């Protein structure tokens, strides 16, 4: 269902059976909720200090090689809103090893 680099890759897929508005049976597949891992359980690779013009996609590419892996940096910093990481110059961002 998801690429192996996706944050949703290892999540269980559940199904729900229901009747739609036309009275027809319908099966809905969905991914169960993802719980963010404890940042304390991750191994720090490096710390990055935010400078003027930094963007999370560029930081992610620099350290992890793929801008779509920004969620790993968010997890390592206990952040739900990615923009929080680069909002302030001087913020120190933890870059952790992927927890595979």
Image (tube, grey):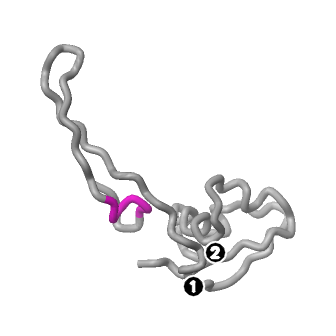
In the image, residue 38 lies at what x, y percent?
55, 72
Q: Is the magenta stretch mostly helix, strand or loop?
A: loop
Corner quadrant of residue 85: bottom right
Image mark for residue 43: 1
Mark 1 to mark 2: distance in Å?
Answer: 18 Å
Rendered position, 94 above or below 46? above
Residue placed under numbered mark 2 in the picture: 62
Which residue sits at x=20%, y=29%?
18
Rendered position, 42 above or below 27? below
User: In the image, is 57 to the left or to the right of 28?
Assistant: right
Magenta region includes residue 7: yes
User: In the image, is 90 to the left or to the right of 73?
Assistant: right
In the image, residue 8 lies at what x, y percent?
39, 59
Q: Do the residues labelled 1 and 2 touch (CB within 8 Å)?
A: no
User: In the image, is 59 to the left or to the right of 54?
Assistant: left
Q: Which of 73 and 78 is in front in this view?
A: 78
Identify the magenta region: 6-11
Corner quadrant of residue 28: top left
Question: How many numbered tags mark residues here?
Answer: 2
Query: Which numbered disc, 1 or 2, marks the residue closer to the eye?
Result: 1
Magenta region includes residue 74: no
Q: Which label's residue is closer to the chain start, 1 or 2?
A: 1
User: In the image, is 11 to the left or to the right of 82?
Assistant: left
Which residue sits at x=60%, y=71%?
76
SS type, badge 2 = helix
Which residue sits at x=22%, y=44%?
15
In the image, residue 1 lies at what x, y percent?
28, 54
For the C terminus, the quadrant is bottom left
In the image, residue 30 lies at what x, y percent?
30, 45
Q: Nearer the viewer, residue 17 or 91?
A: 17
Q: Which residue lies furthest to the top in this view?
A: 22
């Amino acid at each position: 269902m998801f690429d192996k680099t996706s944050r949703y890759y290892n999540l269980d897929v559940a199904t729900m059976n229901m009747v739609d508005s036309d009275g027809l049976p319908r099966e809905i597949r969905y991914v169960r909720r993802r719980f963010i891992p404890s940042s304390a359980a991750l191994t720090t690779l490096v710390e990055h200090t935010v400078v003027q013009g930094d963007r999370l996609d560029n930081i992610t590419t620099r350290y992890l090689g793929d801008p779509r892996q920004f969620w790993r940096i968010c997890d390592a910093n206990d952040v739900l809103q990615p923009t929080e990481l680069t909002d302030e110059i001087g913020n120190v961002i933890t870059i952790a090893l992927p927890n595979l």
